[in-house]
Image (cartoon, coloured by chain):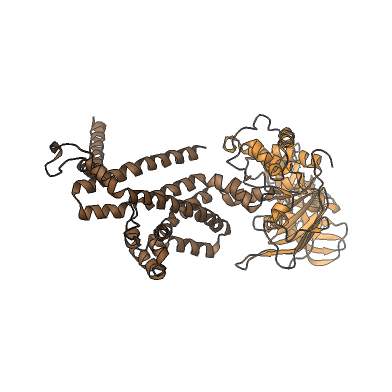
Amino acid sequence: MRDRLIFAGQLGFTLLVAAFLVVPVLLSISAGITVNYFRGIQSGVTLQWVAQVWGLYKGEIGLSFLIAFATLAVTLVVGVPAAYGLHVRGGRLSRVIEEIITLPLAIPGLAIALALLLTYGGFGGFRQSWLFILVGHTVFTMPFMVRSVMAVFASVDIKTLDEGAASLGASPWTRFCNVIVPNALPGILAGSLMVITLSLGEFNLTWMLHTPLTKTLPVGLADSYASMRLEVASAYTLIFFIMIVPLLVAMQMFADKGEKQ
Amino acid sequence: MNAITGHGAAVHIIDCGKTFPDGTQALAPASLDIIAGETLVLLGPSGCGKTTMLRIIAGLETPDAGGRILFDDTDVTAIPIEQRHVGMVFQSYALFPNMTVAENIGYGLKIRGVGKADRAARIAEMVALTNIGGLENRRIDQLSGGQRQRVALARAVAVRPRVLLLDEPLTALDASLRDRLRSELNRLLRSLGITAIYVTHDQAEAMELGDRIVVMRKGAIAQIGTPRDVYFQPQNRFVAEFVGAANIVEGPIAQGRLSLPGGWLALSDAADAAAAVAMIRPETIGLVAEGGASLCGTVESVSFIGDRQRVIVTGAASKPLTIDAPNGINVEIGQRVGLSVASAAVRVLPKED
């Protein structure tokens, strides 16, 4: 009896906390498909706001995905070998470099953006292209890739595996492809997941770096919150949701599969 | 060169030392010649430099300036491990978790561009040699420790290395399995006729496997010799005590006799000395009647071990003597006993500074 009470109490508390977090999401979504939010859901359900947002912002949405995947590509190509190098080399210098890579986590995005603007703002073509935002996102997401890959390296004793492959005659590049990457896969997937979601949702940096022609999803979202009806902004949130949730689920499933192997 | 072995290379280590960037010297410059086809064991406690020496031979560490490594007559000092054509068995095995047993064994062959059919044949040969039939398609995490050890060995030997390097390959296994694999490994190394360098801290392993043993201490070579040399003729106190059990006795030598508190021992050949140190192995001391014995003492304890009994005798030397006596004789605690030691079994050790 007492156990059951405790269980009911815990369940109730958990549900309350979950509701506290989930209700705003549901409200926001419902607002996005309501004809008039102030009159409530009885005013009718509509997809007109969603359609309007899609019409207005599909460029931003496309650009966001372009930047997210480009960021992923850069962090993979640079981050995985960097993590390998740092892990195998070890020592103080490696730790210093790791700290420097991690630094953008501690520095406000606005400050990073300002530094990028001060340094490269003068290069007009670069400043105005989406590549400028890509640089910001890469700086911001790199530590997540490097760290999660390094964590796996430490857990599977990659250094000895590497030496084992070397003793069998494999060149550094062959070792990297045959032994390092396959065994670091769980970390690479976890890192990729972080990079994609962080890049898609990044606002601070991007808001400073964007131009009217290089806006991303979150910047567009801020735009629509500031200047449009609440229903439009909510519909925007809904689209953001629909885009990112399947991606998260897919990568999570992928990561689970990688771990099982 | 037959189907299974490669040709074993002679290895020459010339003035190879290793100082790490933080200034600690892991290995004082040392030279060593390893004969083609022999099994050489590097034996010593942890931190003695044996693994560093092995890694220098493998090409995983570079020796300090001036050091050189030769395989036969080829200087390989500047050649990275992947081009040295060695086989290596690691303490943690370093098997690739992303490959099956067969893929692990065939990896070195694949790297060398051996065709699929030849590779399969060689893998089958290795599987048979190391008794791991039926495991070919298993993943590494589905293997027991002993099976992993065999796969690691098969993988290292599959490429017909010029030198096989083994870094404490049995240490991660439990005791009974270790004993069994040790004799298996011994048979394998003999039949391969390969040059093998084997690192261990276990003197029983070193005795059984080594054609020669290099005893190391604090980054330097303490003695090089056959297992019998090292056991019966240790050149210093460290070797005497590290390899097997040893009684160390101290006393003056005069007229071919070593004087001890409980009497004296005859020596086969020794110069007079005011203070000498000698070693006696426990199994070389015989228990005899007190009367007529040149050295006597009192039995302090007797432990029955099965194949023998370990008797501790006090009063004979300044420290209690350990004696391995046959299991059949009857000794009692407190009994006065005479000790007989053949003069050849008393090994006078050089003075240590």
Report the residue at 44% width, 46% height from top: A190
Report the residue at 26% width, 46% height from top: A53
Q: Is residue A90 above or below residue B94?
A: below
Query: Left or right of B135: which side holds A42?
Result: left
Query: Left or right of A3: which side holds A120?
Result: right
Query: Which chain is painted in orange?
Result: B
Chain A drawn colour: brown
Q: Is residue B307 above or below residue A179?
A: above
Q: Position of residue A62 (x, y in %)?
A: 37, 49
Q: Decide which of A83, B178 is in the foreground and name it.
A: A83
Q: Position of residue A226 (x, y in %)?
A: 21, 55
Q: Decide which of A140, B331 is in the foreground and name it.
A: A140
Q: Position of residue B25 (x, y in %)?
A: 66, 65
Report the residue at 18% width, 40% height from top: A34
Q: Position of residue A185 (x, y in %)?
A: 51, 45
Q: Decide which of A173, B7 is in the foreground and name it.
A: A173
Query: Dividing the picture into quarters, in which one does residue B50 lie?
Result: bottom right
Q: Is residue B169 visible?
A: yes
Quarter of the image containing the N terminus of chain A? top left
